[in-house]
Amino acid sequence: MEHFHIAVSAAAYFDGDRKQSIDILDECIKTDPKNIYIHYLKASCLNNLTSSESDLNIVRNNYSDAIHHLEKALAYLENIPKLPLPTLAKTNFSHEIEEPEKQVERINDLKFTPICLLLANVYARAAESGVSIDLRHIYGAKGVDYVRQVELYSRSPNEPYLYMSKGGCYYACGMYELAVNAYSSVERFEAVLDPNAIIDSLCYASNGMVALGYSDKCLEAMEFYIEKYNNDARLVFQKILCKEYMCRSKDELRQVLKEFEQLKESIQDLKLTPWIYSRVNEQTDARINDIFAAINNPQIAERW
């Protein structure tokens, strides 16, 4: 118990010296290697730390380490007798279009703070860390399995964090319709959520719509949400992205290129958080470079 209290203190100190917090948790794990809560705290800290990391090698290593600790915690729980918990009839906003599930065997997990939920989120994030397509699909599929555990057996309610993780896992698997449905469920919580969380879910849902070939419908939706959320730069980017995918000539690409350049210029004067600015700026730079290369590539026809 003493080691657990030390671990909790380390996690609470995470906003200070993050490396020191991780080091303290490592020492606690060495002393008490079968304490599932310390493994959970270590994985949670790694997940939070990695959200602001730009080096993809560090990102992949951190997510791999977090997955290792969470799966180790579940492995230790396998040796503990399961309580006779039936499935729960919980509200599930994204269940309507899913195929009826086969019987899913319950994994022994914490009832109210499920390890499976954090593990699904880490798998969803790991799938977006520049890994191979095959590994991306594997991560997504594993994440979906853990999402189902939470939906069926956890005493934790189905909250926006679950739907964001669920959407990310389905997207990684290439199951875009289910991904859009999961991401769209987050909007149902707008009365209690920070608008930034809603906007993020809309952007991810937009990517799924584009992947499904519905750029035109997505464009209409983005115009509605841009007005609703006061011209948020993230939504403006998604709107221009829809236009890019609707292009059928280099002339149309040139017009889209101008819009991306205008967006890049406009965000310099907006009061954006560093994270939002960095995200929109990096995404816009990537599209500008790719479109410029396509326009100047003689092997690409003028129209298609």
Image: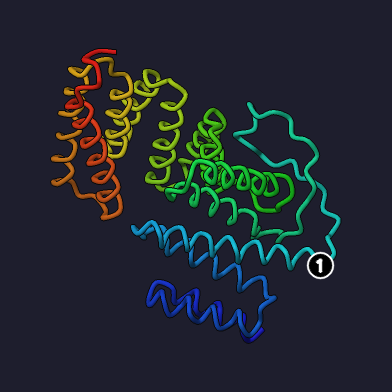
Quick check: 232 left or right of 162? left
Is residue 259 or residue 56 the one in the foreground?
56
Q: Quadrant of residue 67?
A: bottom right
Disc 1: which residue: 80
- Dot 1 falls on a residue whose secondary structure is loop
- Residue drawn at (53%, 33%), measured in percent from left and top? 174
Image position of 68 with respect to 249: above or below: below
> How far from the left and from the top, in percent, is residue 92?
64, 37
**Residue at the spot x=61%, y=82% of the render?**
30
Quarter of the N terminus within the rendering: bottom right
Q: Nearer the viewer, residue 121 or 174?
A: 174
Labels in figure, total: 1
Q: In the picture shown, does residue 203 fall above or below 273?
A: above
User: Residue drawn 66% across and 39% down?
Assistant: 91
Amino acid tagged 1: Ile
Residue 298's spot in the image, x, y percent? Answer: 19, 22
Whether residue 143 is situated above or below residue 290 in the rendered picture: below
As drawn, is 297 to the left or to the right of 167? left
Q: Residue furthest top?
A: 303
